[in-house]
Amino acid sequence: LKNSTISQEARFKVAKTSYYKGDFDWAESQLKILKSSTSQLIANDALDLKLLISDNKYDDSLHVALKLYSKADLMAFQNKNEEAIALLDKILTEHKGESIEDQALLKQAQLFEKLKQYEKAIVNYQMIIANYKDDILADDAYYSLAELYNNVLLEPEKAKPLYERIIFDHEDSIYFVEARKKFRMLRGDTIN
């Protein structure tokens, strides 16, 4: 059962636990193995977490911001959303300008949405779009904000230009196909 989906899932959970505990080197070594997982979902999750760790562990040799982020991530996993938001606030004030800032803004925006604090979520998404429009999380911010406007706040006219930005500026995005479909629907095109 060495390469079974269950064993890969277990390895991912062990890696995630190591990440939560702040043992980033061990987590990264486990995630490196899982990148080639036969389960696409596990491989994607492993790659996302590995990128988060590798992108942020070199900014600070003590990993202060990354440890705070992993703790906030754990709080969010445990549905302790207010505590997670407070930790992310700490990152955003004490580690301004570091590479983890956009990740903290996105995570916090997602938590604000969970708590139905939509205005705060909008502010965070807009900060990512304004300050990190060429970074890897820009399309996440565009798509999440468009979905918030389109599906929750029922303001499709505000969603349309956000979907359009994904189509024109992020054609390699995982959201590209969905954004194009939703943009065309909002524009009034007939979709087969």
Image: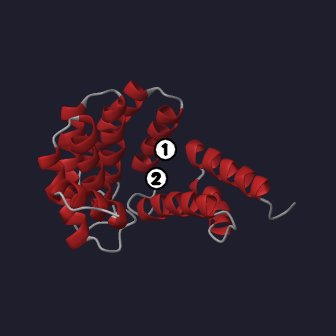
Using residue 120 as the reference point, say whether residue 139 is left or right of it.
Answer: right
Going from N to C along the chain, the mark reached first, 2 or 1, is: 2
Q: Which mark is residue 62?
A: 2
Q: Quadrant of the C terminus?
A: bottom left
Quarter location, residue 58: bottom left
Q: Residue furthest right?
A: 1
Residue, x 65% and y 52% (percent of image)? 15
Q: Residues within 10 Å of mark 1 (few under 14, many from 20)?
A: many
Amino acid marked by disc 2: Leu
Instruction: Depth check: give the residue in front, 157 or 58.
Output: 157
Residue, x 21% and y 42% (percent of image)? 149
Q: Residues within 10 Å of mark 2 (few under 14, many from 20)?
A: few
Residue, x 28% and y 65% (percent of image)? 180
Look at the numbered discs 2 and 1 and tell me whether their residues touch, using CB distance below 8 Å.
no
Quarter location, residue 112: top left
Figure check: 140 above or below 69? below
Residue, x 18% and y 50% (percent of image)? 159
Figure check: 131 above or below 89? below
Would residue 95 be visible to someone looking at this image? no
